[in-house]
Image: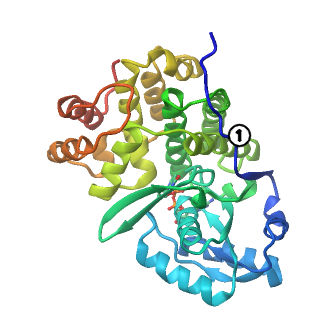
Amino acid sequence: MMESFVFPGLATRVVFGSGTIARVGDEVRRLGHGRALVLSTPHQHGEAEALAASLGDLAAGVFAGAAMHTPVEVTERAVAAYRESGATAVVSLGGGSTTGLGKAIALRTGADQVVVPTTYAGSEMTDILGETKDGEKTTKRSPEIRPETVVYDVDLTLTLPVGLTVTSAMNALAHAMEAFYAPDRSPVITLMARDALVAFRDGIPALIADPRDKAARARALYGAWCCSTALGYVQMALHHKLAHVFGGSFDTPHAETHTVLLPYTTAYNEAVAGAELRPIADAFGADTAAGALWDFATAVGAPIGLSAIGIAEADLDRAAEIAVKNAYANPRPIDRASIRALLQAAFEGRRPEV
Ligand code: NAD
């Protein structure tokens, strides 16, 4: 029998294709704005300036200071630049760091956001903002955080280095994995999560062979949209919590942290949610979902094992302690000993057993 569900509807307008960056100006005007501040990281400053130049009078300037984990001191400088520029909207060009800065500005000023994602991290469709202050990361969920419009342009992802292509895809797949067993899942989200598996399964090996393969880039970016939507419309559980523990308390790099944890968090929950996670095993033709993700990660040369992100075996006790501090919903109950065992397996990096 069909499970009952509630689906809230998708709140964000999406423009997807090749060359779509040329439509950013129309999308800003469509939202009723005459001035928008363009945001980027220092690394993508050149691309942000080029976009601002193409926007002409619509561009109120460029702020190219976005940084990983949305530090509040950067946001404060960006909000000052935003107010001074006379903008009423932001255009966030880049990965999750730049999208995060746009969300932080929107939350404080009411700015509308047009996001142009250039990685597969998947922040653009969500109402989630993680911010850091004095070394502590806090996460908020609120409707004002969710971007109004997302312009996906495949051409902008052609320059994504192979290493980040792989870890960013694993980051996206983590959103799909947790969507399969989320208590508030619905058929639309489950369908998108299933489609994302196929998109990345086929797209990533092709991109390793040729990072500028446009058809494969389009598949991967489509997968990222599906995964971002999944993250934005259901609750996340153990996997995202653990990634947050390592990113927040051990300062590990975001996409790599998701990558090395994913097979082991999947195995932990697959023990009780085998039926829900079956689509992952099926999509990859493997015996288990956790095994499928480990096989895929290994085949595409992803980092394996917690030592790959600078974690020592001596850190595992403290990580387990932090991970069980606050309660949250998860298919399998969480206790310190089980989480410590999960972390040991993730440290050793062998193919997980379910
Ligand atoms: P990132 O945005 O920090 O980008 C990494 C680096 O790659 C940057 O220097 C960036 O300029 C560069 N880059 C991006 N796209 C490129 C391209 N196409 N070509 C060449 N270089 C490119 O990394 P990320 O993994 O996309 O984002 C991580 C951040 O996103 C974290 O802070 C994380 O917390 C956040 N995030 C938030 C959510 C959410 O819903 N709130 C979801 C996922 C990630």
> Residue type at mark 1?
Arg
Residue 86 position, x and y percent, is 69, 87
Q: Position of residue 39 (x, y in %)?
A: 62, 73
Residue 336 higher or lower than 77, as above or below:
above
Q: Is residue 29 left or right of residue 111?
A: right
Residue 88 image point, x, y percent: 70, 77
Mark 1 element type? helix
Can residue 303 be seen? no
Q: In this figure, what is the number of numbered marks?
A: 1
Task: Give the residue displayed 25% in from the left and 36% down from the top.
Answer: 343
Which is nearer the eye, 161 or 107? Answer: 107
Picture residue at 35% right of the left edge, 60% below the top = 137
User: In the image, what residue occupies the spot 45% across and 16% down?
Assistant: 274
Q: Is residue 251 above or below residue 339?
A: below
Judging depth in this view, the residue of 16 and 142 nearest the camera is 142
Mark 1 — residue?
A: 219
The residue located at (56%, 66%) in the rendering is 98
From the viewer's side, name the closer residue of 272 and 318.
272
Examine the image and state in which quarter residue 48 appears.
Answer: bottom right
